Image: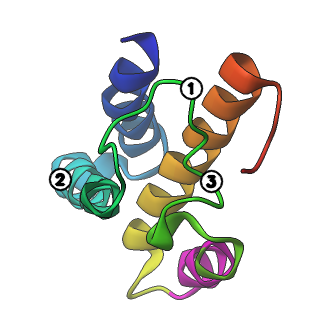
């Protein structure tokens, strides 16, 4: 539950600190990037508390994460990239805490 709440709290903090003039828009865009978790619907079972999503789910693969990093540096896609990277970093930390691995 703590991990899930961080997916709401961290983007809010980033939006407030770095995108102050348009923090509400920034927060909404970063929250929309959480839809990346729809790829969990392709797994059987859909949810497994012991499974590391990094390297397992299609949109959580290293080559997609590299693309998300690139998006962070392009002005028009920066918010999407930042939101996706927040998500991937939080998921990686969760993998380390729950399974002692960084990637599946």
Q: Residue at coordinates 34% horizontally, 36% vertically from top-left? A: 47
Q: Is residue 68 magenta?
A: yes
Q: Which residue is mark 2?
A: 28
Residue 10's tag is: none
Which image quarter: residue 94? top right
Q: From the image, give the main secondary structure of the stretch colored magenta.
A: helix
Q: Is residue 32 magenta?
A: no
- Which percent across, then down, holds residue 24? 17, 47
Viewer-nearest of labels 3 and 2? 3
- Which percent across, then down, holds residue 88? 57, 52
Q: Residue at coordinates 67% horizontally, 19% vertically from top-left? A: 98
Q: Which stretch is magenta?
A: 65-74
Q: Is residue 15 left or right of residue 3?
A: left
| Label 1 crowd (10 A; few <14 / some 14-19 / many >=20) | few
Q: Disc 3 versus disc 2: distance between alpha carbons? A: 24 Å
Q: Which residue is mark 3?
A: 54
Residue 50's tag is: 1
Q: Are marks 1 and 3 in contact (CB under 8 Å)?
A: no
- Which percent across, then down, holds residue 59? 46, 71
| Label 2 crowd (10 A; few <14 / some 14-19 / many >=20) | some
Viewer-nearest of labels 1 and 3? 1
Q: Are marks 1 and 2 in contact (CB under 8 Å)?
A: no
Viewer-nearest of labels 1 and 2? 1
Q: Residue at coordinates 49% horizontally, 62% vertically from top-left? A: 57
Q: Is residue 44 left or right of residue 58?
A: left
Q: Earlier in the sequence, mark 3 or mark 2?
A: 2
Which image quarter: residue 35? bottom left
């Amino acid at each position: 539950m703590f991990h899930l709440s961080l997916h709401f709290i961290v983007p809010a903090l980033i939006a407030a600190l770095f995108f102050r003039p348009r923090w509400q828009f920034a927060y909404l865009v970063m929250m929309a990037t959480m839809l990346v978790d729809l790829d969990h619907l392709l797994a059987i079972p859909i949810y497994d508390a012991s499974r590391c999503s990094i390297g397992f789910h299609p949109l959580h693969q290293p080559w997609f994460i590299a693309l998300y990093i690139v998006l962070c540096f392009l002005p028009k896609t920066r918010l999407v990239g930042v939101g996706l990277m927040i998500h991937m970093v939080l998921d990686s930390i969760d993998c380390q805490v729950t399974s002692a691995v960084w990637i599946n």
